[in-house]
Image: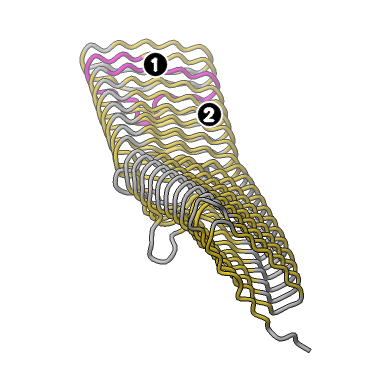
Amino acid sequence: MSVPKRTLVALTITGAIGFQTTAVANQSNEITINQTSTSDNSLAATIKVTGSKNIANLTQTGADHVITTQKEGDNNKSEVTANGINTKIDIKQSDNEQLTNLKTSGDDNTFVITQDGYSNSNQIDVSGNSNTVTLTQTDSLNDAVIEFIGDDNSALINQSGNSNIVNYRVEGDANDATIIQHGDNNITGLVALGISSNLGNNNDIAITQDGNHNFAAAKSVKGNDNYLDVDQIGSNNTAFVYDLTGTGNDFDLEQTGNNNSVLMSQMSGDDNDIEIDQSGDNNSISQLNITADTSSLAGAEVVGAMTVQGSNNQLDFEQEGNANNLSFSLIGDQNDIDLEQEGNNHTANMTIEGFDNTLNFDAEGNANQLHNIVMGDGNDIEVNQTGNLNDSYAQTEGNSNQIDVEQHGNENRSTINTYGDSNNIRHSQSGDLNVLDLITTGDSNTLILTQSGASNWIGGSDSFAIDGSNNSFNVAQAGNNNRVAGSIAGNDNSVTINQTGNGNLATVIQQ
């Protein structure tokens, strides 16, 4: 037998002081409280509900108000509207399938929402400045939609359980949000609602997801000096960054676990900084297309094609794990690229075309390959490989280039082709079966080459050919079956060869 619905339309209060306390038990009740303060005094309302399918509607207008609601039971709903300043709202809901709709306008308001149970929902719309929202949801299948319109607002969302959702949108400046999700299959992000983008400057959002199969996103963000920090701990997690426009934005993505992925597309602006750090196996960064004047990209394992166009770019890659693959093409100015690889089966392919580029490569592991082609001015290239089956290839066409290659391990091969001016090439190999194949055509080149081990080469069947002016060529070999072939053609060349070991052959032809 159902209990008939009881409606309490209570107490529209206009005056100096208002205090309303309502307690309802059982189910299918509806409570409506309207409070308006026309002076500097405060209003207070407390609603306690026990039972199921109850509805509480509360509206306050004025300043320095307090709203407290406590609900126990399933399928309860809270509708709270607050217009004013210095209002404090505390909503506590226990059990399942609770719904809270909170709409506020004003400044310096504080909202605390606590939901204990599953399938609870929140719609929070905050319009104003310096407001604070704290939302705590425990259990699973909970969702929250939070929208800030204004400046200096703050949100803290903490969800514990599985299959929870947080959708956060901001329109304004200097807003910050911290979203923490514990569990599996959770979804969260700075995502535009409908057709409205996230707009504003100096906004910060920090996302932490602890579990597996979680998804974090930043979509349709337009503004400057915004900061996004995503930390995912677990396996099969995904970070998605799409449609970002602005200058001086900072994106920091960190994934710890296996089979995690980062998907990025459509980024434009100047002096943006993107850092991606992945630890684990079979992680990937894919479908990356950064156009216009983008700034920096830092990442771990990159699978797929990347394009970066712009100026003052900084790229930092860090790889830890197995079977990693990186490939990108950079067209821009004054780029700084740093790549670290630790693990097995790494492959890096780079094509860089621009000015004042600095490239640093470091690899530790097995079966590493690095191929880079640089066409530009003032490039500095450094490659350091330690491991087995390493292959380094560098082709540089430009001015004032410096190339430094070190390989430590077995079956290493380094091929350097340089076409340009004022190049300085330094090479060192220590290990077995190392081969350097070098062709240099340019001006004022200085070459220092050192090999230590067995079966090392300086030139292959056709290579080691230097054609230019003011070149200096130095070779030191220590080991077995080493050979130096060549020829050198140009002006003011100086050649020094030192071989120590067995079966070494040096053939140099100067013209």
Q: Of residues 175 and 407, which is closer to you in this image?
A: 175
Compared to residue 231, the image places residue 439 above or below, namely above
Q: What percent of the width, then of the height, locates residue 279?
A: 60, 42
509 vs 133, left or right, is: left
Residue 326 shows in the view: no
Q: In the rendering, which numbered label is found on residue 433?
A: 2
Q: Secondary structure at mark 2?
A: loop
Q: What's drawn in magenta, residue-wise?
A: 445-473
| Residue at figure coordinates x 58%, y 64% from the top left | 122
> How far apart, in angstroms, are the residues tagged by discs 2 and 1?
19 Å
Q: Residue 56 sits in which quadrant?
A: bottom right
Q: Is residue 467 magenta?
A: yes
Q: What percent of the width, then of the height, locates residue 481?
A: 51, 22
Q: Secondary structure at mark 1?
A: strand
Q: What percent of the width, then of the height, locates residue 344?
A: 59, 40
184 vs 361, left or right, is: right
Q: Of residues 237 and 425, which is closer to you in this image?
A: 237
Q: Amino acid at mark 1?
A: Ile
Q: Amino acid at mark 2?
A: Leu
Residue 474 shows in the view: yes
Query: Which label lies toward us, 2 or 1?
Result: 1
- Residue ranking furthest to the right: 1
Q: Which residue is mark 1?
A: 448
Q: Of residues 408 and 10, which is closer to you in this image?
A: 10
